[in-house]
Image: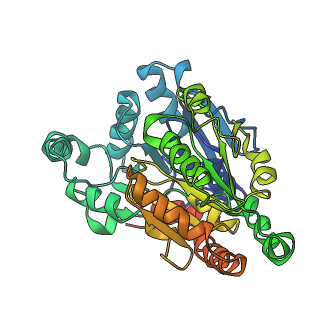
Amino acid sequence: MSDRRTAKPRVLVLYTELAPYFLAGVRRLVHEHGACVHIVHWPVNREAPFALGRTEGITLVERVRHDDRELLRTCVGWSPDIVLCSGWVDKGYLKVCREMHRRGVPTVMCSDTAWRGSWRQWVALFAVQTWLRRTFSHAWVTGGPQARYAHYLGFDRKRIRTGFYAADVDVFAPLAQLLDGPKRDHFPHRLLCVARYIPTKGQQLLCDVFAGLCDAGHARDWDLWLVGTGELHDQVMGSTSGSHPRIRHVGFVQADRMPEVMAQCGVFVLPSTYEPWGVVVQEHAVAGFPLVLSDAVGAAERFLAEPFNGHRFIAGDPTSLAEALSRILNASDDALIAMARHSVELGRAWGPGDWARTVVELITGP
C-alpha cells in the first residue's frame, strides 16, 4: 500500500456499466492531479453502447477477464490509495474492498439509490450493516435522499459525500452560447427526451400526451424528438401516438454526436417513473434547456428550480404531464430564454473538476 499523502494517487475503480460522463471525471483526476487509475468494469450496456475510447493514465479491464480470486490478487498488486466501488452488487468487488479496508485503504461505496422507506430497504438496513462496516469506510452518493440512505446503513455523516455523478460540462457548455445567437433569434419549438426505451422511462406516456395536445390544437408549432434505444423502442415507435407525424424517434446517438441533436431542440423532458438521479438532466441544464421533469427524477433536487427554469409533474400522471407541457408550449420565447439561462447557472455549479477534487479529498481526509 502506498502513502495516502502521495502526490500521484493510485485509484482503483470497481464499476458496473461505464458511461462517458464518469470517464470525464476520471480524466480530470489524471490530468489535474497526476493520478494513475485502474478501472475494472462490466460489459458495455447493449442499450447504451457508448464508445469509451482510451486515455493515457487510465487502464480499463473487463470484469469477465478475472474470476474473484484473480481479481483480488490483481487489485492488491496494484496497491491503490483508494478504491471506488459501485454499490454492493458484485461479490468479487466486495472481496477486494474488504481486503483493502483491512489494509487501511479508503474504500468508497458509490451509489445513486435513494431512501424511499420501502420494506425492502428496511430489511436491507439490518441485513447488510454488519459486513458493510468491514467493507467500506466511506459512501459517495448523488444527492440528499441517497445520503440519508447511506447514513441509515451506518455511515457516519462525516464520511458521506454527495455529487458522485457529474456531467461532462465542457462538452455541453458551448451549446449555451446558442442562447445569444440562433436560439435568441428563433427559439427551437422542439421538445427533446433522451432515455433508454424501458418501462420506467415513460416514453409511451410522453407520446400519448404530446400527440393528444397536437390533435387538440394545443401544441402550436411544437414537435417532439426522442433519442435512445431499448426493449420498448419498436413498440413505442409503432404505437398510434408514437407514430404521430410531429414525433420523431432518432435512435441511439453516441455522446460526441449529441450536441448536434441538442442544438436543434429547445426544451428537455424526462417523464420517468423511476429515476434515482439522471445525469442527462444536468447535461441539458448546462446546455441551456428549460426542464420538464417528473417528480421521480432525483437530479431535480440540484438542477430544477421551479418555475424559474422549468416545471415538475406527477410521475405517470397524464393530466399532470399535459399541464406541465402546456405551460412550456404556451410560454413566450423570451420567457423560455430566461428559463434556459437559469438552467445554465444551476448546471455549471458542479462538474468533473469538482468530482476529481473529491476523490483526492477522500484519499487524504478522515
Q: Is residue 106 left or right of residue 307?
A: left
- In the rendered view of the protein, which quadrant contains the C terminus? bottom left
Residue in view at x 15 percent, y 47 percent: 122
Given residues 150 and 13, the one toward you in this image is 150
Q: Report if residue 266 is visible in the image.
A: yes
Q: Is residue 133 left or right of residue 26?
A: left
* Residue 344, placed above or below residue 56: below
Q: Position of residue 97 (x, y in %)?
A: 38, 40
**What number of labels is visible?**
0
Q: Report if residue 142 is visible in the image.
A: no
Given residues 253 and 124, the one toward you in this image is 253
Residue in view at x 21 percent, y 40 percent: 131
Given residues 282 and 6, the one toward you in this image is 282
* Residue 124, placed above or below residue 222: above
Given residues 352 and 175, the one toward you in this image is 175
Residue in view at x 44 percent, y 43 percent: 85
Q: Residue 95 falls in which quadrant of the image?
A: top left
